[in-house]
Amino acid sequence: MPSRAFLASYRRLFAAPGAAAFTLTGLLGRLALSMTGVSLVVLLSERRGSYGLAGSVSAAGLVTGAIGMPLIGRLVDRYGQARVSVPAALYNAVPLAGLLLCVRLGAPDWTLYLCSAACAAAPNLGGMARSRWAHLYRADPAARHLANSFEQALDELCFMAGPVLAMLLCTTLAPEAGLVTAGTLGTAGTLLFAAQRRTEPPLPAAPEQEQTTTGQQHGSPLRAPGLRVLVLTFLATGMVFGATEITTVAYADALGHKAVAGALLGLVAAGSCLAGLLFGLLTPRRAPGARFLLGASAMAAVLLLPLAAGLGGAGLGVLGVVLFAAGTATAPTMVTGMTLIQDLLPQRQFNEGMAMAVSGIVVGISAGAALAGTVAEHAAPGTGYALPASAATLALLIALAGRRHLLARPSSPGGAAENSERVVSASV
């Protein structure tokens, strides 16, 4: 498709007043999130001289963040984005500042764990942005598909730019510069995002007034079998991300070019970003559940390429090509998964449901990175690529086992918003 038509397709998303404002402000906060992990590791490894301490302190924040994000999402669904995200962002800045102060003053290690664990109230700006798109284009399934694809591309853009910016700040200014910048951007971005009130979705009907078609009231989003399948699938997908990152660093290091690892991982994100943008231009001809199964199948197949390159002792050039190809399969799966969440849940549970999916990814990344680190220490270079390939296969098996729930027609008021898309796709 010509570039002019490409730009025109995405430009129409921003015809809605305020769409550009919440996208740009939310991007600041999401960029900050992608900077935090690298910034923390560099800071503690420099000031405390221990990568082990840096990794475990970072892990403490990931664990509590994975627990706190769905809780924040539930509050957002109940009280609104601005009323929850503003105090959450202001609160989150306090333990982050405390962590920097503890490092500066040479406080005991346990204070670092405490401060990192307390940073568990970061709002899921990506989920809130998707919720805004879903409300703005609630009657236009094609536009929602385009918006979800665009949001996934923004996630990948942050994944590429955030760590690079963090490393630049930490190495050229001071080890603390990355975390200070991340905290500033995160707080400012969230506050500016919350200030965009005209695009904030209105609060839906109270839980006691909203029932499923079977007459039962909604409880936790996890009561929806389809969401349980998606969370488990995203957990396995997170393992793909975590294992790929550590294995790629170890492989490049084994070849004597550790500095190239960042560029190789950037190619994974670039492939996913490009695939997400192109995927958004396609007109959906199948129901989201069917598209999700196809995406998971493609991801499992393509991730065999890095495994073959690693076991075959391929050079970094070949590895870069196959990692780019591997990245192209993850975006369609993620995009369709987020569409499915909007399809399966009522509007009043969108943010909590999407936060649960993101938490599953975070837990998976941690598990995948830990497993890959162990494999890298005890196996030949490239062997670790068996982990992302296996995790992608596990994601496919989980999706196939739960396909009945993914392909089912929506039984909730929120899922009814997708009925028009199913009418279009029913003929395929």
Image (cartoon, grey):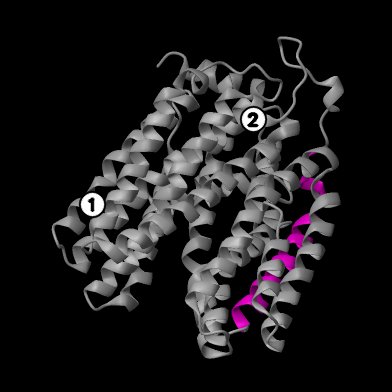
| Left or right of 198, for residue 276 | left
Residue at numbered disc 1? 307
Q: Nearer the viewer, residue 61 or 16?
A: 61
Residue 376 seen in this snapshot? yes
Q: Is residue 26 magenta?
A: no
Q: Nearer the viewer, residue 327 or 382?
A: 382
User: Of the residues shown, which amino acid type is indicated by label 1?
Assistant: Leu
Image position, residue 204 (x, y; %): 81, 31
The number of numbered badges drawn on the structure is 2
Q: Is residue 189 magenta?
A: yes
**Label located before the other in sequence (1 or 2):** 2
The part of the chain drawn in magenta is 177-201
Image position, residue 57 (x, y; %): 59, 68
As displayed, is residue 113 above or below residue 277? below
Any mark on residue 421, and which?
none
Image position, residue 388 (x, y; %): 34, 49
Q: Quadrant of residue 78?
A: top right
Image position, residue 230 (x, y; %): 52, 33
As displayed, is residue 54 above or below residue 158? below
User: Of the residues shown, which amino acid type is indicated by label 2?
Assistant: Leu
Q: Residue at x 81, y 65 (%)?
A: 90
Any mark on residue 222, and which?
2
As displayed, is residue 315 above or below residue 243? below
Q: Residue at x 53, y 50 (%)?
A: 363
As displayed, is residue 79 above or below residue 255? above
Tell me the distance, in whole angstroms, between the alpha carbons under discs 1 and 2. 34 Å
Residue 196 seen in this snapshot? no
Which residue is situated farthest in the left direction here?
Answer: 312
Q: Are marks 1 and 2 in contact (CB under 8 Å)?
A: no
